Image: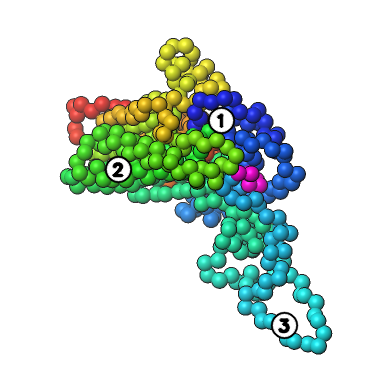
Amino acid sequence: MSQKPQETALSKCPGCEEPAESGDRFCGACGYDLSAVPAPPRDRPTVALTVPAAENRPDGAGGSGDFELAAPATADAPGSDRPPTRSPAQAQEATAHAPAAGASAPAATGAPSAAPPVPDPRTRTDGPFATPPAGTKLCVACRAGRVDTDGYCENCGHAQPRERDHMEQELGSVAAVSDRGLRHHRNEDSFAVSTTALPDGSPAVVAIVCDGVSSASRPDEASAAAANAANEALLESLPRGTHPQQAMHDAIVAASKSVDSLAGETGRATEHDPGRHQNAPACTLVGAITAGDLLVVGWVGDSRAYWVPDDRSAPPARLTEDDSWAAQMVAAGLMSEAQAYADDRAHAITGWLGADAYELEPHTASFKPDRPGLVVVCTDGLWNYAESAAEMAAVVPADARSRPLHAARALVGHALDGGGHDNVTVALVPFAVTPQGAGSGCDTP
């Protein structure tokens, strides 16, 4: 979770007493709107659920680092973009008088008949709940009720997970996974991965990861807009022959303009953040391009890229430098890295994409690795649990280059096992080196 510098927020959530982090606009545990601070609601029914692992791991991967996805276990917050969770009683009342699908009207008789009892779908052995029509979405909570068009179960009233709560994509040798984490009410990260061809026909692989700034309005929209804009810019410029480092610079500028444009949509900001002052949507960005023997990274903010060689006896490296308060303290020699990142102000960023950002300064760097390896592109939701290059290399599975999606899941699982205090997003980009003989003169990261 990236944060702009701002005043200190509440120390505890008024709704559930969970400690609140500086810059949080909603409670990560219950989704409570920390900016409004009304009286705590009397009833916040919660249901802790786990989606079966088989439904969340298409490849059936198991072993260390795998995890199961948790459906949202909290009531939706006042001011969130969803209506409050309906109770089972409300859901039952809403559907009690509707005839079951395929049921015929009762035969007319001389006396009024009592309404038949509404069956419990969890125990029913016949009818529409036993064999739902093809394409029917079932509730992740009771596993029996249909999900209505508003995203709630018609049987138990449970709000279903948002589409962005957990996202995965594998595209050839590159893969990415993003997860809401265990404390936040929504996923404000986003990513884009793609492949294209250079003018000479050789492949180029792209990975973009963005982290929404939680203290800004609509951070989820900002991260999605930035990731898509940067990816589209690269897919347009790389095939034309633009040098990858220049292409990355231009892609960050395009992403910045895309996020800037969201600031003018004041109506949507009011709808999503009632009662709160409007501020510009914002996010961080980090990206990587592999093209031939060249590795290019670009960034703004505190999302990072790491180099992890296949030969784990060779040193790994961090390829980016944070735009953050902590990094400034270390660069100025005022604090050690350990001291700076232990400070409460460590994650106050000094650079971001957004209409209210300081002067945009895209950072880019290029490398020519002399050995095969892996580029880890991630938000602070991951590197908070593996901060140094050595720590990151230690948690990357040994077979990550050949199984990038499995490895990305394992890294997200590592962050969740560590506490999952933030959204977690990671993209893995394998880097292969074509043997060129001795004396190639390549620089290493």
Counting residues from the start of the chain, the first of labels 1 and 2 encountered is 1
| Residues marked 3 and 1 touching at CB (< 8 Å) | no
Q: Which mark is residue 233?
A: 2
Name the amino acid, label 3. Answer: Pro
Q: In x, y percent, where is residue 64?
A: 52, 41
Residue for point 42% across, 29% down: 357
Q: Write the start and end of the magenta stretch as one range.
A: 73-79
Residue for point 57% across, 37% down: 276
Res. 153 in view:
yes
- Label 1 to label 2: alpha-carbon separation: 31 Å
**Element carrying mark 2:** helix
Name the amino acid, label 1. Answer: Gly
Counting residues from the start of the chain, the first of labels 2 and 3 encountered is 3
**Outermost residue, top side:** 334
Residue for point 29% across, 36% down: 250
**Element carrying mark 1:** loop
- Tell me the crowding category of disc 3: few under 14, some 14 to 19, or many 20 or more residues within 10 angstroms, Cα based: few
- Tell me the crowding category of disc 2: few under 14, some 14 to 19, or many 20 or more residues within 10 angstroms, Cα based: some
Q: Locate the C terminus and report the quarter of the image it occupies.
A: top left
Q: Which residue is mark 3?
A: 106
In which quadrant of the rendered view does residue 186 lie?
A: top right
Q: Which mark is residue 145?
A: none
Q: Which residue is mark 1?
A: 23
